[in-house]
Image (cartoon, coloured by chain):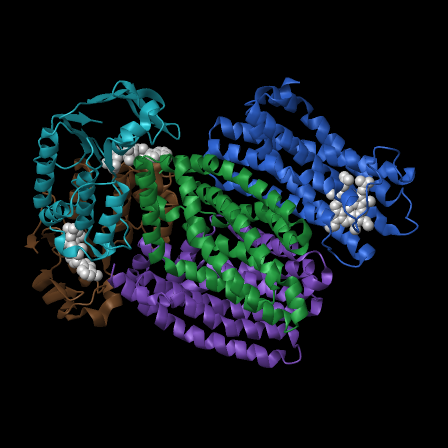
Chain colours: A blue, B purple, C green, D brown, E cyan
Amino acid sequence: MKFLVNPSKFNELADYIFKPVLILSILLFALGLLFSFYLSPDDYQQGSTVRIMYVHVPSAWLALLTYAIMTLYSIAALAFRIPFGFIFNTAVAPIGAVFTLICVISGSLWGKPMWGTWWVWDARLTSVAILFIIYLIIIFMNLSIENRNVREKVVAIFILVGSVNLPIVKFSVDWWNTLHQPATISKLSKPSIDPSMMTPLIIMTLAFISIGLSIAILRIKTEIISRKSNLG
Amino acid sequence: MIILNKIISFYYREYKLNLSGFQDILTNIIFFFVSIFIFIFSIGPDKEKISTLSIGIVWTLLLLSSTLSLRKFYQDDFENGSLLIMHLNGFSFGFIAILKTFSHFLFVQVPFLLSIPIACIILNIANDKIIYLVASFAVGSLTLSCLGSISSSMNLMNQRNFLLGSVIVMIFSIPIIIFSVSIINIEESFNSLISILFGILLIVFAINPWASGLCLKLSIENN
Amino acid sequence: MIILNKIISFYYREYKLNLSGFQDILTNIIFFFVSIFIFIFSIGPDKEKISTLSIGIVWTLLLLSSTLSLRKFYQDDFENGSLLIMHLNGFSFGFIAILKTFSHFLFVQVPFLLSIPIACIILNIANDKIIYLVASFAVGSLTLSCLGSISSSMNLMNQRNFLLGSVIVMIFSIPIIIFSVSIINIEESFNSLISILFGILLIVFAINPWASGLCLKLSIENN
Amino acid sequence: MILVKDLSIERSNKKIFENINLAVGSGKIILLKGKNGSGKTTLLKAMLNLIEPSAGAIYWKGKLLKKNLYNFFNNVTYIADKTSSLGKLSVQENINIWKRIFLSNISDSQIENILSTLKLDTYLFQKVNSLSFGEIKKLEFLRLILENKKIWILDEPLSNLDSESIEVLGQTFEDHRSKEGSIIFSSHQKSEINVSEEILL
Amino acid sequence: MILVKDLSIERSNKKIFENINLAVGSGKIILLKGKNGSGKTTLLKAMLNLIEPSAGAIYWKGKLLKKNLYNFFNNVTYIADKTSSLGKLSVQENINIWKRIFLSNISDSQIENILSTLKLDTYLFQKVNSLSFGEIKKLEFLRLILENKKIWILDEPLSNLDSESIEVLGQTFEDHRSKEGSIIFSSHQKSEINVSEEILL
Ligand code: HEM
Ligand SMILES: Nc1ncnc2c1ncn2[C@@H]1O[C@H](COP(=O)(O)OP(=O)(O)OP(=O)(O)O)[C@@H](O)[C@H]1O
Ligand SMILES: Nc1ncnc2c1ncn2[C@@H]1O[C@H](COP(=O)(O)OP(=O)(O)OP(=O)(O)O)[C@@H](O)[C@H]1O
Ligand SMILES: [Mg+2]
Ligand SMILES: [Mg+2]
């Protein structure tokens, strides 16, 4: 597991697995699209708009997952002095931002037919919007603070503080009564979703994960290189 | 043609200074949206309430953004001598004021202008009103830029009797805001109201190079 | 006793400086009132509506107006070398941060605190609520001063992107806003909510000297 | 080319100097001397029409300077006692901005040459803020070449420079003089720069 | 009293200087020389613990400077190459602020004396912004007397001053030396100030 904390070990592994992951992501994505558009049924209430779910839900999960991992790496970097954490955070923040953006856009597209507006101010949507802005602030801090030693610490602390938002995003639907769908798929007990919709969802989730992973590998590698040559 | 070239180079410099990259525009826009968030949090999520307030929110933020950037308007250029260089390079002080006003409009107000449509969506402003809002905002924000130029050039002189400079400007901006806000509420008379706004803009625009130019000249003389 | 004397002299200096920058304080307050007028105009004369919305508006405007002054927080002292003199005069950077935070509170937030009652009258806020509002703002504004200190010391290292600092302050002030606004709406639990606000204040207050001090040190080192 | 005639300047009702006469001809280098506060900077600024004189007048090519201001500005480079480079930007960015502002047709290789004689070539990507005092000053002199004007007006160019840089500057002055340019500068320091005339304020 | 031992400084991974050794004893005046960008300002700042050295250490009265920082600060006056007076305020107001900040017990008549030797007495109510460059610099030197500390660290004090003021400063230095004070300053100019040691960076 050294590759999780050691840049050169990571590089070795990355060279090894990058191509397979890339190919896998393309395959899964194609398969997922096929499933979600042709091989899954319309919902009896929502009609074909339900297909937005296959983009919306995986991107939402990944937006949250990315931030959660960044939080872990921030702790590692600050508390256990593992500089790879800083590298990881700098490289991965934009990916998380993009997933969040996809989630918000697909959600609003879904919201227009379902709720009648693009946007409502319920707790789930608001907290996701804040998540997006937190991602953006992280990116801009990375771009605009010049002193690297300061920058990475400041950003890591900011990530830690911002992680308070994560449980709010996740559990806001349970804590407050909102328009948004409460957990139906990711419940700990038996999921209350039809298996015919479950299959494309799982495939799409795997596809999103592998796409995110391959971009992350690329970005982490360039980050490592730019640090070695002291460009950043 | 030389003068055109010089004007282009003026804006090249402003661009380099104001937006060392695209990120600064984006930060401006984020600032705008975060401010909207803050309003929403303090008002509560009630749709009705939000939409009665939305125009006020947008205008307040416009006023805020132009007040925020007043300090940057001339102060930095004055202190690092760029103003002098510009003048020696063949621009009269009045002309510098015009160029600067446009640059303020371009780099501070336009990003806001562009993000208004999105803001309207999240603030539940009716689609047909958006066009009015953008139009009144476009005229009003240029007026605010002119007023900002006047007040911040007054501030350069840094004398106690000009303490009222920014006060006067703020007070001048009240009629603009009243007209703009009512533009949205009374749609029928949109044309007549926007022409009043235009009238105000023209007056302020005509005064600006003269007033700001004088203040710039005096402050350079006394430095 | 020497240290006490030195602290007094610090505030004497701040007083002299802020007095000559009285303009800025005035601008902030005028911004506050002009924005209130904007809201009144955009809502229309309906008293009911105004008073249900007013507390949220006051709070947001207070927040926005205090971001107006963030630029002044350390920038001037940094540029003219006063920060260095203070340090060489025996104050650690963290201690300077504390002193400066209080000075910001004193010269920027307290004037607001004083103008809240007037704003309340304009906005038809019930008299008995004014005291809650002032109390919550007193605690909240000190928190905002601490956050402002952190973000503007960060800005010293990153002199271009001024708004980023304000955005960070605003993000962190969201919980403060939520709690403060609900203080007014749910009066019964005033005590428990204000103690939450106090808790937040304590945390930020404890972090402030450490974080700002570090940023000040680094920015002086790199100058 | 520039003729200063009976110039007197008052500020806040205090006389700074009276009845100054001076002529800046082409091919001349003029040194302004005088104590602190004797009005050197004030005189130079007045020659740029930045300060209103209380009496006397300034002529440019026989005409009143005021009437002919922008033509005059087209022929003059002024380097003030404060620097005009932008601290937040890098040396390179500053040069680019200057090149555009002054519509300069100096080639890049020439600029590189100058930078390397000024020993600034290794700092191209460094922020001006983080340069040393003297380096910032030297960077400012690049404007003399970039603007490529006939008249140079310089306020205390020699302070904060090391002797090597002063030598380089002296040579540049000499070059300019030989091209029929004219220079007027103020200084407190004794230097080896060969001046045509010294004026004591 | 101050001992600099094998000091090396790097900034942005660029070596500025290496292995500097120097001792500032009481009654000594030390002159730092060197080209532009050789690191004089950097060295002076490092001696005030404002810049982290990459190697080496600085001792104050035998103890590590870092451990003993505020005691050291109580004994030192630093005058940077930038001035620290507040431009918006008048000379008088600036002096009042300094007097309070440094808890100075110098009497008003003494201050007036100094101001008149520096020829600043007529500017008491003028804004610092409108003073001449040299006058602002001279005003800064008032801090040397106001603070009344043992060690003076000065960055290019002589630039922009006229010869008369340099003489006054030289005398002040001499006075300070005779009171067992110590001075370290940087300069590019040759001057008549009597230094105990010259260090070339
Ligand atoms: C812009 C608007 C929206 C945003 C920001 C948003 C955000 C999110 C987020 C963050 C999740 C993941 C939550 C988790 O992991 O528990 C999620 C899940 C989900 N969303 Fe949305 N959403 C939006 C609109 C919608 C709409 C309009 C619908 C459909 C009516 C919808 C249906 C769902 C469903 C079914 C899930 C899966 C819930 C689960 O089982 O975990 N969302 N959304
Ligand atoms: N606005 C003003 N009001 C009153 N006096 C002023 C004003 N501006 C400048 N002065 C005074 O004019 C005098 C001349 O200033 P100037 O800057 O020309 O001197 P200088 O010869 O350049 O001196 P230095 O060698 O120190 O640069 C100074 O004594 C200054 O105090
Ligand atoms: N943050 C930084 N990053 C990189 N280089 C730096 C930084 N700060 C200073 N330098 C470089 O360090 C060198 C020394 O600067 P310093 O100001 O000490 O010179 P100096 O001897 O005082 O020169 P001068 O005589 O011009 O005042 C300069 O070449 C400068 O460019
Ligand atoms: Mg001068
Ligand atoms: Mg130096």
D19 and C40: which one is in front?
C40
Residue E77 visible from this viewpoint: yes
Q: Residue at x 20, y 57 (%)?
A: E125
Position of residue B87 measured from the top left corner of the image (x, y, whole percent): 30, 62
D68 and C156: which one is in front?
C156
Position of residue D76 measured from the top left corner of the image (x, y, whole percent): 23, 58
Query: Would residue D57 appear left or right of A146 to someone viewing this image?
Result: left
Q: Dividing the image into 4 quarters, which one contains the N terminus of chain C? A: top left
Position of residue A188 measured from the top left corner of the image (x, y, whole percent): 83, 33
Position of residue E186 measured from the top left corner of the image (x, y, whole percent): 20, 33
User: For the image shown, how many numbered marks are present on the structure?
Assistant: 0
Picture layout, residue E70 above or below residue C127: above
Q: In which quarter of the image is residue D60?
A: bottom left
Residue D176 visible from this viewpoint: no
Q: Which residue is drawn at 70% across and 62% down?
A: B124
Picture layout, residue B134 above or below residue E187: below
Q: Residue at x 66, y 72 (%)?
A: C46
Query: Would residue D194 appear left or right of E3 to someone viewing this image?
Result: left
